[in-house]
Amino acid sequence: MSTPAGRRNGARARDNALDGQAETAAPPDGLEVAWLRIDGERLAVLSYPLAAPPDLAALTPAEREVVQGLLAGRSNAEIARARGTSVRTVANQVGCIFQKLGLGSRRELASFASGRSCDGKE
């Protein structure tokens, strides 16, 4: 079965772009290399420390209240009613929360917050 020329050229262009990225990418800070020998093959094991996870204590008290609402499965409108604020205010706070914590969704927030209380303590 043959591949259309456009698709082949697109794949080639993508591979060339990736090659350029690999050549210019800086290694992560703290990169360590360990060597293993398995069945006569020498293998490199690369490791580096991960950045510390963002801290819920970095959130304002109002943002922590919003987090509690989000983790309870409430909508922005429900959180706004309970807090006596506008839906737009809650939406802005949700955006700030996601930005401060490096998250992109309520699901990621739930995963991040598991095992932590909303007051920033583990």
Image (cartoon, rainbow, N blue to C red):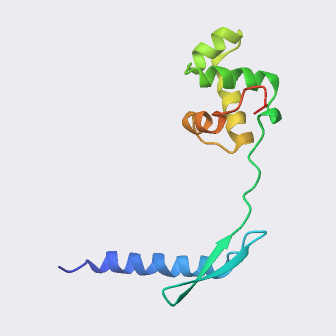
Residue 88 versus residue 108 in the image, above or below:
above
Q: Residue furthest front?
A: 39
* Left or right, residue 100 beside residue 91: right
What is the quadrant of the C terminus in the image? top right
Please state the horizontal and vertical placement of residue 77, each as a whole percent of the image.
58, 16
Using the rendered view, name the quadrant where residue 35 is placed: bottom right
* Left or right, residue 4 beside residue 16: left
Residue 110 versus residue 22 in the image, above or below:
above
Using the rendered view, name the quadrant where residue 81 is placed: top right
The residue drawn where x is 55% and y is 21% is: 73
Please state the horizontal and vertical placement of residue 118, each as a whole percent of the image.
73, 26
Nearest the viewer among 43 and 99 is 43
Nearest the viewer among 30 and 21 is 30
What is the quadrant of the N terminus in the image? bottom left
Please state the horizontal and vertical placement of residue 66, each as a whole percent of the image.
69, 22
Residue 120 versus residue 37 in the image, above or below:
above
The residue drawn where x is 77% and y is 51% is: 52
Please state the horizontal and vertical placement of residue 18, each as a whole percent of the image.
54, 76
The residue drawn where x is 81% and y is 23% is: 61
Using the rendered view, name the quadrant where residue 22 is placed: bottom right
The residue drawn where x is 72% and y is 20% is: 65
